[in-house]
Amino acid sequence: MDTAELDEIIEQAIGVSQDRHQLWVNLSSRLKCRSVCEVGVWKGQFAETLLTQVAQIEHYTLIDPWRNLPDWNKPANKTDIEFEEIRNEALRRVSPFLDKVTEIRDTTRNAQSQIPDRSLDLAYIDGDHTLRGITIDLHAMLPKIHKDGFIGGDDFTKTIWQHSQEYSPSEVFPYAIYFCEAQGLPIYTLPFNQFLIVNAQTGFRVIDHGGYATLTPAQIYARPRAQKLRKKLKKFLKA
């Protein structure tokens, strides 16, 4: 698939999608993804959607430790008891497709050895959104992707302060862009806080469908309190 054709497919998928689930159903279908891996499954809604609506998917790998991680400072880090219930819900959701589904109940770092290199059409990353987490996930998943395959992901938020300041920042954005620059890969920013990386050595470029190009470092990194104070100061100076 050449660059112009891929650009058109992505633009069309964006144009007919109202949320992130629709977007990835449309992208997965149009990009002919048959082997998919999801990193960070949670309750399985995303997996259920893709397996139900994208009939061409032949194999779907679920990677999630579904356990409390003592070094992960995020609101989704629940107790082990809660994670058992969350995992059971996820498995119920994908139960009609068990002939297609493989569960790897572990962290990405440990799970990567169970996935053959160059075996995936798409890896969708929705796990540990800290700088450490997205670094591990992207580096672990890239060797698993076919040539011209894809890595997508969620929580590509325009500020690193996705949650309150008691939690670690979310740095999927801008790290994924830096990763692509280092690897020489194209990356598409998408609506609904999504991104799409192409495993093609066509050179680094950012195709900005999500409106990230105009962001300033202050908007990305400033703590919420600092942002509020800056807005108040601007209003005061204009008065």
Image (cartoon, rainbow, N blue to C red):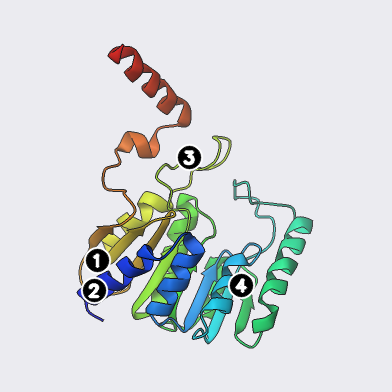
Kind of residue indicated by mark 1: Gly
Mark 2 or mark 3: whose residue is earlier in sequence: 3
Residue where numbered disc 1 is placed: 184
User: Looking at the figure, which quarter contains the C terminus?
Assistant: top left
Is residue 176 toward the left or the right of residue 154 in the image? left
- Give the quadrant of residue 7: bottom left
Circles 2 and 1, Cβ within 8 Å, touching? The answer is yes
Mark 1 or mark 4: whose residue is earlier in sequence: 4
Q: Give the distance between the C-alpha atoms of the residues marked 4 and 2, in whole angstroms.
A: 32 Å
Circles 4 and 2, Cβ within 8 Å, touching? The answer is no
Instruction: Pinpoint residue 81: horizontal percent, then vertical percent.
Output: 79, 57
Circles 1 and 4, Cβ within 8 Å, touching? The answer is no
Look at the image and tell me whether residue 125 can be seen. no
Front label number (1 vs 4): 4
Front label number (4 vs 2): 4
- Give the quadrant of residue 49: bottom right
Residue where numbered disc 3 is placed: 161
Residue where numbered disc 4 is placed: 48
142 w.r.t. 234: above or below? below
Residue 201: which disc? 2
Is residue 88 toward the left or the right of residue 7 in the image? right
